[in-house]
Image (cartoon, rainbow, N blue to C red):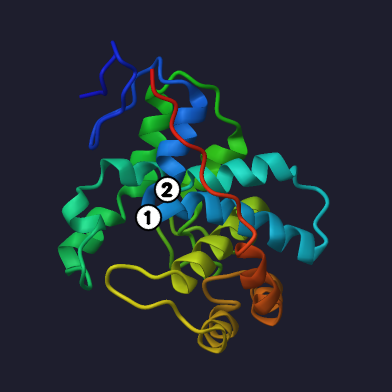
Amino acid sequence: MSGDHETGAWSEHALPPKTLPFPEFIRQVADMDEGHGFRVGHVAQTIADLAGINTIDRATLKMAGELHDTGKLLIPNEILQAPRRLTADEKKTVQRHPLLGLAVTQWYDHDFTQDVLDTILMHHEHWDGTGYPLGLKGDSIPQLVRIVSLADTIDACASRRRYKAPWSVPRLQEYLHKESGRSFHPDLGRLCADKLPEIVSSMRTIPPAPTLRVG
């Protein structure tokens, strides 16, 4: 099932029309959860700047952050928007989104960079090998993906969701320190914990998401 090929619209729980303009593809993916993807793209660039990482193209990093959750467009809304903690079966459904995202990129008529594809597939891999869907460990997770994974976590915890209030900076710092060397690269995780007030402050400067073009 795919979106409306005549109008170029992308309906929920459907593959995007192959003719959908790429800026609109980005907007629809990145605008989920009230702009989560846009914020992740911004925070990922901030982390790379704070870490002094000059080998990663910032435009590519931004796009990888914006598109990391592409597969969630194929996850039912009643699960994604549940105002409660998910059941074990619902969590398994959500954990399909990295592979679903990769499937969407195979269908849609656009040449995605390898960095973006890696991020869509691997952004829930953990430094200690306990992540999903591949169980990758340590340096087998690309550096760009490690950065987006941290940005994803920071925004998810710092933002209000239907099932939780936003975390305080001290609570999130404690979590990042605890998960450094577990979920996250040890040095990068500690850097984000130490620089978290600066990262959170930078999130207030993110411009509004672009408006979807109509007609």
Please, is residue 84 above or below residue 203 in the view?
Answer: below
Q: Secondary structure at mark 1?
A: helix
Circle number at residue 136: none
Residue drawn at x 53%, y 45% is: 66
Figure quadrant of the N terminus: top left
Q: In 3D space, how far apart are the residues under numbered discs 2 and 1 (Cα atoms)?
A: 10 Å
Residue pictured at 46% horizontal, 81% vertical: 167
**Which residue position holds label 1?**
33
Image location (x, y in percent) of residue 142 = 63, 52
Q: Is residue 117 visible?
A: yes
> Residue at (45%, 69%) from the top-left corner?
159
Q: Position of residue 183 (x, y in %)?
A: 52, 71
Of 150 and 195, nearer the camera is: 195
Query: Which residue sits furthest top?
Result: 6
Which amino acid is tagged 2?
Asp
Q: Is residue 140 left or right of residue 152?
A: right
Q: Amino acid at mark 1?
A: Asp
183 horizontally vs 7: left or right: right
Give residue 90's quadrant in the image: bottom left
- Residue 176 position in % (x across, y down): 57, 79
Q: Is residue 92 left or right of residue 131?
A: left
Specify few, some or many for label 2: CA neighbours under 10 Å numbering under 14, 14-19, or 20 or more: many
Circles 2 and 1: CB atoms closer than 8 Å: yes
In the depicted structure, whether residue 189 falls above or below residue 46: below
Image quadrant holding the C terminus, namely: top left
Determine if residue 133 is in view: no
Camera-side residue: 156 or 71? Answer: 156
* Disc 2 target residue: 69
Q: Position of residue 123 (x, y in %)?
A: 49, 54
Q: Quadrant of residue 200?
A: bottom right
Lower position in the chain sequence, tag 2 or tag 1: 1
